[in-house]
Image: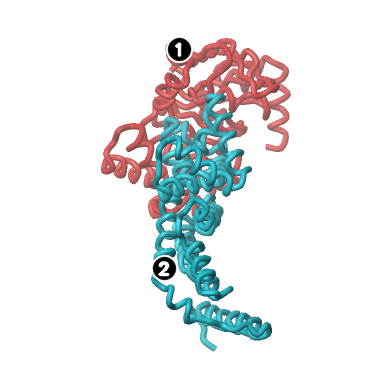
Amino acid sequence: MKLEACEVTKRYGNFLALNGATFQTGDAARVVALLGPSGGGKSTLLRVLGGLLLPESGEVRQDGLVLPHTEDGALKVLRQNGFVFQGYNLFPHLSALQNVTLPLTQVHGQTAQQAHERAVELLTRLGLAGHFHKRPAELSGGQQQRAAIARALAPKPRLLLLDEPTSALDPVMTGEVLDVIRELAEGGQQIVLATHEISFARKVADWVVFLANGRVEESCLTASFFNEPSSSLAKTYLTGLSKYR
Amino acid sequence: MTSGPQRPYLWTFVLFVGASLALYATFATVHYSWNWQSVWNYRSQFLWGWVTTLLISMGAMVVSIIVGFALMLGRRAPVEPVRLLCTGIVELLRGSPLLVQLLIGYYIVATALRINDPLVVGIVLLGCFEGAYLAEIFRGAVESIGASQREAARAVGFDIVQTYRFVIIPQAIRRALPGTTGQLVSLIKDSSLLSVIAIEELVQKVRILNSSSYTALEGYLPLAAAYLIVTLPLSWFARQLERRFAYET
């Protein structure tokens, strides 16, 4: 997969979340990590890359194909992608199983039977056997996030986009969720991951995009980012993060 | 002392008896002389009034829920004139007296449109009036569903209709239920105003009864009871619904 962004800008009111963000990954990037300080534009860029947010200006390309700039066009693209959020964002009125099956039947045209089988298979694989009929509030944070990953994976997305998937979890649950993500990456799933889990990114990602103040400061192979970061912002960020780890 | 599931019923009974005694004692203090016979003579009239009230209320409830939902959607529409129009309608209906709306609606608007059935006109006018209140209750409930739920709905690929159908409305119903019940109870009582457009509903029947039998208050106690017979089950039913929609968030 090759991901490209060209002069992407996105505003929230007066705040410029992305200020001409530009990067391109190598041709065969499979797991792309978006790193950088909070408020730097990671989450916004992730949403723009997946088609969930439309930028004010600029262009995004997946394998050379330009993402459409209309709501309807973007919806088609985003239906091929899967999203996982920091706050899980499961539907609280539905059971874990229904959270997974509903998009399959309503958006992807599967029969109830097919959707049910797919959901059972995925939830079991992600360690949620026995929790199918629980509502999100009855699940732990780690379980909720794994259910959310199952929901995103169910339609077999081309690209799985994860926005700080472990930031709301304690270390044990973080471990559970990172294990799942690593297995997916090793299984060949194409992933874009915004995270603060620096050592996880180092292990699993093959490309790093480093953002600060709405701009891409660095875009390079994982090894070269961690071994010899070129921008001073990246150096400061890495030293700051590794201080107590 | 009993315990378990019977206990609330026991307390209800005790409180009911207590309240009845207090009411009786109050009437006894002012030496009111009852004349129940004349009320009894009018029982079939009373019953017809009650049925009319029931019919109007049920019709107006359906109208008000449809009107309320439409106005709520209109107030959230992306097109500005629609938004302004619906806001204007809500403010006008909520801000002016129902009495005026009924008089102008029946004697001017309905006459101009050549609709003569006061029952139909009454149901529509009452439904619109209460619908304006419901629109705001619905809007509050819909807007309380957070941005993250809307984003999640879009992220799984739902379009705007699917987002409302599968994500927003099921969650909003639960939040709108208590307010909606209160409004529907109000609707039942507000239906008494329809007597001004020549509908002989329950309150009007009681007024006729009181004036023709020279009684003052005898009709009003059964009147209150007749309303409670409708409003209490409604509240009970709403509580059952609330329980069905209850889940932790």
Shade representing chain B: cyan
Residue B149 x/y as whole percent: 52, 39
Point 56% across, 36% down: residue: B89
Which of A27 and A87 lies nearest the eye of the viewer?
A: A87
Q: Mark 1 to mark 2: distance in Å?
A: 75 Å
Can residue A174 be seen here? Answer: no
SS at circle 1:
strand
Q: Amino acid at mark 1?
A: Val
Can residue A158 be seen here? Answer: yes
Q: Amino acid at mark 2?
A: Gln
- Chain of residue at mark 2: B
Shade representing chain A: red
**Number of marks present in the image shown:** 2
Point 67% across, 23% down: residue: A13
| Residue receiving disc 2 | B45
Residues at marks 1 and 2 on the same chain: no
SS at circle 2:
helix
Crowd class of label 2 (few under 14; some 14 to 19; many from 20; radius 10 Å):
some
Point 61% across, 31% down: residue: A198
Specify the quadrant of the image occupied by residue A33: top right
Is B49 rendered above or below residue A153?
below
Residue B9 x/y as whole percent: 50, 79
Residue A150 x/y as whole percent: 42, 40
Point 33% across, 43% down: residue: A121
| Residue receiving disc 1 | A66
Indicate the quadrant containing the N terminus of chain B: top left, top right, bottom left or bottom right: bottom right
Is B172 rendered above or below residue A66?
below
Disc 1 versus disc 2: nearer the observer: 2
